[in-house]
Image (cartoon, rainbow, N blue to C red):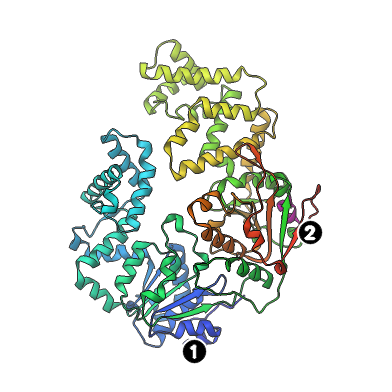
Amino acid sequence: MQNNTIKKNDSVDKLLDTLNPEQYQAVTTLDRALLVLSGAGTGKTKVLTTKIAYIIEKGYAFPSQILAVTFSNKAAKEMKERLFSMSDGAEGIWLGTFHSICARMLRYHGDLIGLSRDFNIIDMDDQLKMIKQILKELNLDKKMANGLAIKISSWKDKCLRPDDGRVTAASLEAKIYRIYQERIFSYGSVDFGDLLMYAVQLFKDNGHILQKYREKFRYILVDEYQDTNAAQYMWLRMLSSTGSGLCCVGDDDQAIYGWRGAEVGNILRFEKDFMNTEIVRLERNYRSGGHILGAASGLIACNEKRLGKTIWTDGDNGEKLLIYKAYNGFDEAKFVVDHIETLRRRNLDFGGMAILVRAGFQTREFEDRLVAYGVPYKIVGGLKFYDRQEIKDVIAYMRLICNQNDSLAFERIVNIPRRGVGAAALAKIHATALEQNIPLFRATQKMLRDGELRSSLVSSLSQFIDFIESMQSKKDLSPAEAAKLILSETGYMNALIHENTLESSARLENLRELLPALEEFNDLPSFLEHVSLVTDSRSSKTEDLVSVMTLHSAKGLEFDAVFLVGWEEGVFPNSMSLQEGTLEEERRLAYVGITRAKKYVFISHAINRKVYNQWQSNLPSRFLSELPEEHIMHCNVAKKNNPQHF
C-alpha cells in the first residue's frame, strides 16, 4: 500500500516526494481546468489533500480562497483530518458537501430570494408528513406520498421549479409539488433538494453575489465528480465559468448512481465544458494484485461511454479470480462459506472478507449458511434479512397463529395492513386484557362478543380474529403455504403492490425471497425456532465480522477477499438494466465489485435458482465472458464442495 502518513512538520517538498509522477502532475497543475481520472485504489484522497496543502504552503491562495467539495460528511471529515495533519494553515478553508456549502451560502444571502436566513432544513420524514397532509386535503391516497417525494426530489435535482413546463406536463404531480413548495417556503423551511436549487437561483438572480464568489474562490476542488447531478453541475459551472483553478477528481468507470440522479455525462464532457483542459490519469493501483486489475480492466473496456484508462500495479499478480458454477443457490452459499472458513484458517480475519450482492433480497441464503456455520457477520447499509419490517410482520402472524397468547405479535400486526386500529382502540384492548388478566387476542375476542368496540372496528377486527383462528385449525399447513395465505388473505401483498414505490418494490422482493426459505421447514414451530437462532446471532461483540452488503454499498471500501455472487443474466445485470438501456452502469458496478479486493476474488453463478418461489435456469452473466481468460480460473459444479479450490 502507498504510504499516506505525512507529518505536520514535513515541508511541502517532502509531501511532493511521496507522490508518483501522475500524482505529482495532478497536485502541481494549477493554471487551467484539471480533470483527474482516478482509478480504484490509486490515491485520489491523497492527491486532493496534498494539492490543498501545496496551494496553501506555497502561498498561491489563503485557505479562505479555497473551496473543496465532497459527496458525504464522512468523506469531508476524512479529508479535513488528513489536511490538518499536513498543514497548520488549513483553518478557514471552505470544505464540505455540496449541500452544506450551499446551505452556508444561503444563510448569508437567502433573503435576496425571499428566504429567511435562519431557515430550517427538514428531513425525509417531515417531507413525507407534509406530502401526506396535502394528499389528505385533496382526498387522495396517502400511499402516493413516497412516490411523490421521490418525484419531487428528482425535479429538484434538475433545478425544475413547479412552474417549469417539464413539470406542469404531469398535472396532478405538478399541483402537489406546487402546493408543497409554497407551504414549505411559507414555513421558512427547505428540504435537501432546495439547497442546491435555491443556490442556483441565488446566482441566477443576483449576478453580483455570483461574481463575489467567483473572485473569492481562486481554487475549487471537487471529489467524486462522476456522481454529480444536474443541479450540482449547474451550480459548479456558474461558480467556475472559465475553469481556471478548477480541479475535479473522479472515475467515469465507477459512475454507479444514475438511478438516483447522477449524470455520468458531466464527467465525460469535461473537456468540452472548459477550454484548455488538462486530463491526468491516475492508473497505478496500490490495493490489488495484477490478476484482479487485469480482469477489472478487461471487463470495463467493454463500455463505450468512457474516457479510458487502464489500472495497473508494479506488485505481484497475486491470485487469479475464481469463477464457480454452482448447482443452485444453496450450493452457492455453501461454496462461499466453505471458502470463508478456509481463508480464516489461513489467518485472514473475517473482517477482511465481504459478500457482495446485487440486491438486498439476495442475502438470505448466505445469512442462513453463515449462521449454520457459526461465522460472525454483519449487514452493511441495511438490516439483516429476518430483521426487515415486512419479514418480521409475516413472522409475527406466524407467531400468533402458533400461540394466541403472544401479545407482542398481536400488537405488531393487529393494524398491519391498516384496519383502523389506532392508539385509542389499542389502549382499550390493553385495559381489558390487564383487567381480565388475559392476552390481547382473547381480550379482543371478548370485546367483540360484548359489543365494547366501536362499530367501525367490528368488521375489520372480526375478520382478523377469524383469519387467525382459521389458520390455527389447519394443522398440516406448511410454513410456505401459511405465508402465502397470510400475504394474500390479509391484503398485505396487495397493499405493497398498490403503493408502487421503490421501497415497496424492495419489500415485495424480500417477501418473495422468504417463500423458498420456508420450504426448508416442515412446520411453523421449527421455522420460528430457526428465526430465533438467526436473530440471536447479533449478540456477538466482536468487530471481526464478515461484511454482507450490496455492490452499491461497497463503493469506497476494500477487503482482502471479495465474494461476488449471483452473476446471472436477469440478476446481474438485472433485468431492468436490459430494458432501460443502463447496461453500462451495471458493468461499472461489476468493475467496482472486483476492485474492492486486495488478494482474492470469487465470482459465483448458479445453474438453477429459486426466484419468487419458482425454479428457473438463468444463463451465466455476460460479464463473465468479458473477463480476460488469462486472469481467471474456472471451478465447475461438484456434488461436494472442496474448499481447497485455490
Q: Name the front one of labels 1 and 2.
A: 2
Instruction: Please name the residue that numbered disc 2 is placed on.
Output: 645
- The C terminus lies in quadrant: bottom right
Is residue 125 depicted above or below 241 in this figure?
above
Label at residue 545: none
Q: Earlier in the sequence, mark 1 or mark 2?
A: 1
Magenta-highlighted stretch: main secondary structure?
helix
Q: Which residue is mark 1?
A: 13
In this view, 457 is above or below 26: above
Amino acid under disc 2: His
Is 282 positioned to the left or the right of 127 in the image?
A: right
Q: Is residue 451 left or right of residue 46?
A: left
Q: Classify residue 345 as left or right of residue 2.
A: right
Percent of width and height locating residue 578: 53, 52
Tell me the SS state at disc 2.
Answer: loop
Q: Residue at x 57, y 71 (%)?
A: 41
Q: Which residues are magenta?
A: 335-342
Front position in the image: 194 or 375: 194
Q: Tell me the crowding category of disc 1: few under 14, some 14 to 19, or many 20 or more residues within 10 angstroms, Cα based.
A: few
Q: Is residue 401 above or below residue 162?
A: above
Give x and y (percent) for residue 295: 65, 67
Question: Picture quarter containing residue 351?
Answer: bottom right
How far from the left and from the top, in percent, is residue 222?
41, 71
* Above/below status of 442 relative to 245: above
Asked which quadrant contains residue 404, the reply is top right
